[in-house]
Amino acid sequence: DAGVIQSPRHEVTEMGQEVTLRCKPISGHDYLFWYRQTMMRGLELLIYFNNNVPIDDSGMPEDRFSAKMPNASFSTLKIQPSEPRDSAVYFCASSFFSGRANEQFFGPGTRLTVL
Amino acid sequence: KQEVTQIPAALSVPEGENLVLNCSFTDSAIYNLQWFRQDPGKGLTSLLLIQSSQREQTSGRLNASLDKSSGRSTLYIAASQPGDSATYLCALLTGGGNKLTFGTGTQLKVEL
């Protein structure tokens, strides 16, 4: 398996523009997570899905952020409009529910810079 | 709210030394604990996962322990190598077994 795939790997955009980050989870995994990593706040969970359904979006910073999972092999995280403080590395992770194991596997991340 | 702290924040050791990284947490109601490695500009690589009912896990030169009663986990690295240089993160699975809370990380440098 290729692991979790994210695109793009790097994104530079101007304030006010719409940004869309993409993720393909590991085949067969039923959970998908979006995280954000910054120097100030470390790694934070934004939202996670189970069987394509959003379960907990309490980490989404504000209404400018939205996430979708139209099918088991694809998810997007959208920021509209983007702001400089959104600059961070965004990670997607997936896992397969197996009781107490639930090991999460991370993608390589998307480094977002908003000018 | 779960608080996860890692000490030290940074560590520099000579090659070949055995070392211990520490992870402390405030809420013992966890499902499992994962140790990750993150190389600069890269994603996270899962190293070890300890389930809440387990006390330790081993993989090669790595050994992770878990003591829920004291809210502590340690990652032991034997015979360290320059290739072990990276940031090590512990993360606890809570909230019904789906939400990972990450520690602050330990930046390790192994020198020749």
Image: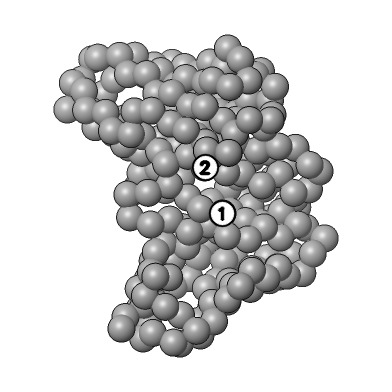
In the rendered view, would you say A84 is above or below B107?
A: above
Which residue is at a point 58% across and 12% down the rendered structure image? A70
- Which scheme is used to colour this image of the protein? one colour
Residue B2 or residue B92, whichever sits in front? B92
In the rendered view, would you say A30 is above or below B79?
A: above
Q: Secondary structure at mark 1?
A: strand
Residue A94 or residue B3, whichever sits in front? A94
Q: Mark 2 is on which residue type?
A: Phe
Residue A66, percent from left and from top: 47, 17
The chain ID associated with circle 1 is: B
Neighbour class for label 2 at 10 Å: few (<14), some, many (≥20)?
many
Look at the image and tell me whether residue A84 can be seen: no
Indicate the quadrant where residue A51 lies.
top right
Indicate the quadrant where residue A85 lies.
top left
The chain ID associated with circle 2 is: A
Q: Secondary structure at mark 2?
A: strand
Which residue is at a point 76% across and 57% down the rendered structure image? B51
Residue A49, percent from left and from top: 63, 25
Q: Which residue bears the numbered disc 2?
A: A106
Neighbour class for label 1 at 10 Å: few (<14), some, many (≥20)?
some
Q: Mark 1 is on which residue type?
A: Ser
Residue B23, percent from left and from top: 57, 66
Which residue is at a point 47% across and 33% down the rendered structure image? A5
Q: CA distance from mark 2 to mark 1?
A: 8 Å
Look at the image and tell me whether residue B104 can be seen: yes
Decide if residue B38 is on the left or right side of residue B51.
left
Residue A55, percent from left and from top: 66, 24
Q: Tell me, yes or no, whether the two marked residues, 2 and 1, touch with CB atoms within 8 Å.
A: yes
Decide if residue A4 is on the left or right side of residue B26.
left
Residue A76 or residue A83, whichever sits in front? A76
Q: Which residue bears the numbered disc 1?
A: B46
